[in-house]
Amino acid sequence: MKLWGGRFEGGSSEVFEQFSGSLHFDKALVFADIEGSQAFARALAKQGILNAQECDELVRAFAEIAHEAKDPAYFDGANDEDVHTFVIRKLGEKTSLAAKIHTGRSRNEQVSLDTRLYLRTCARTLLRQTADLMSGLLELGRKYPDAVIPGYTHMRRAQAVLWRHYLLAYFEMFARDFERMEQALARINVMPLGSGALAGSGFPFDRDEIAADLRFPAVTRNSMDVSGDRDFALDFLYACSMIVLHLSRLAEDWILYSSEEFNWMTLGDGVTSGSSLMPQKKNPDSLELIRGKSGRVFGDLTALFVTMKGLPMTYNRDMQEDKEPLFDAFRQTSGALSMALAVVDSVVLDAAKPAAAAEESWVIATDLAEELARRGVPFHRAHQIVGRVVLESVKAGKKPSDWTAEELMNCAPEFVPEMHRFLNPAEGMKSRELPGGTGPRAVAQAFAEAEARLAAMRSRLV
Ligand code: ARG
């Protein structure tokens, strides 16, 4: 069926119908389409286009379609142009009033409404999942409150940090992702009906009333903007992209940390797989797929960017190409968040391993140089002195704990016996107690704040 045709003498060619039809993917919007159409029927009743009884009949018919559409086979064999057309055809099979439902409404605003209704549910799901992952990270931190790991720059051991400090770094990334998704939701959650095809509807709908009916906190302000706008979809894709970007970096870290070379942590059997040939293998496929699927989501964002960039105002059929990237990005992001949470829950840290990695390398060099500086040695000189100690150690194959206080003092007169304690990574960390640092008290404070912040985020979820 088509929602147009009077102006045509010939029918559509098969190749055009095949090429342009979107029902096979936009059927995912069927429940949103029905919810929006029920509200629109109520708006038509307010306009006197439908009487109360007709409105009830339409709303009921839509509800029946929603019920029937739960069965995926409902769409079998349908060759309607899109989901909006499909729903109206089904409505026509139930009531002759179907011919009135499109009064003063365009598919251009309808598709905007449906996509917004659909995405706001997706955004809320992802918000909840992001919060759950953040809870998982805090739980993993609670299991190893004192564990020390070497932090890296350039993939070289840099300075010692608490395991909890490392996890809180990811907590911050996901906290920003949560806020970003909330911001995307705020732009999604605006009611477009009343815009007509591009110029505003020819019927004076009470748009605020429709918005209230569909639980939108705001209405759009310009009908042309509505027809040509997919910013809200791009905001959603960008918010998804940032989530999977952060998940991908976490995955990369843990692929390394669980390798035989690092050997810091074990991933649960439930999130790893074996090799068809090599019996000893336990591969981190879950993390690799999180890393891999992130590329798809960036592709989804890029695809819609490119689709939109040259479109003249207002609606163009190109915009139908927004759906598959949106659906894919949601599915991949949601899947990656669930997978990541399962991995986080499965991780067993062998805290002695990263502690040994911190102790046997020169991650305390900065601590030592800064302690010299605190005692009045100009920092450049302190840097030079400690650099010499490291060079000598490298040549002699010594680790920090091999040095005695006397040996340090023989190396440079600026050393004093009390500095010897800085050869232990856990000591130097105590000098980093400012907010945001890895000092144990600062981290305990940050951890408590993270718990409170997460509780506040959760309270904003609906
Ligand atoms: N299937 C279309 C889409 O997803 C619906 C809007 C159709 N509007 C039109 N003027 N052809 O964009």
Image (cartoon, helix red, strand yellow):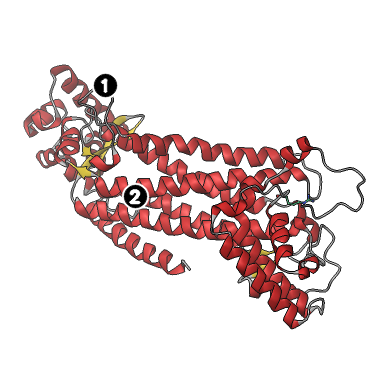
Q: Quadrant of residue 290?
A: top left
**Considering the numbered disc 2 on the image, is that residue within a helix, a strand or a loop?**
helix
Outermost residue, bottom side: 52
Residue type, numbered disc 1: Leu
Give the alpha-carbon distance from disc 1 to disc 2, as whole Å: 29 Å
In the foreground, 443 or 216? 216
Q: Residue 182 versus residue 332: which sits nearer the camera?
A: 332
Mark positioned earlier in the residue sequence (1 or 2): 1
Mark 1 or 2: in front is 1
What's the amino acid at mark 2?
A: Leu
Q: x, y percentage for residue 232?
A: 64, 54
Number of other residues with Cα within 10 Å of mark 1, as a class: few under 14, some 14 to 19, many 20 or more: few
Residue depicted at x 36% and y 29%: 154
Q: Residue at x 30, y 47 (%)?
A: 344
Q: Position of residue 17 (x, y in %)?
A: 75, 41
Determine whether the residue tagged by mark 1 lies in a helix, strand or loop: loop
The residue that mark 2 highlights is 341
Residue bearing mark 1: 277
* Visible residue check, residue 220: no
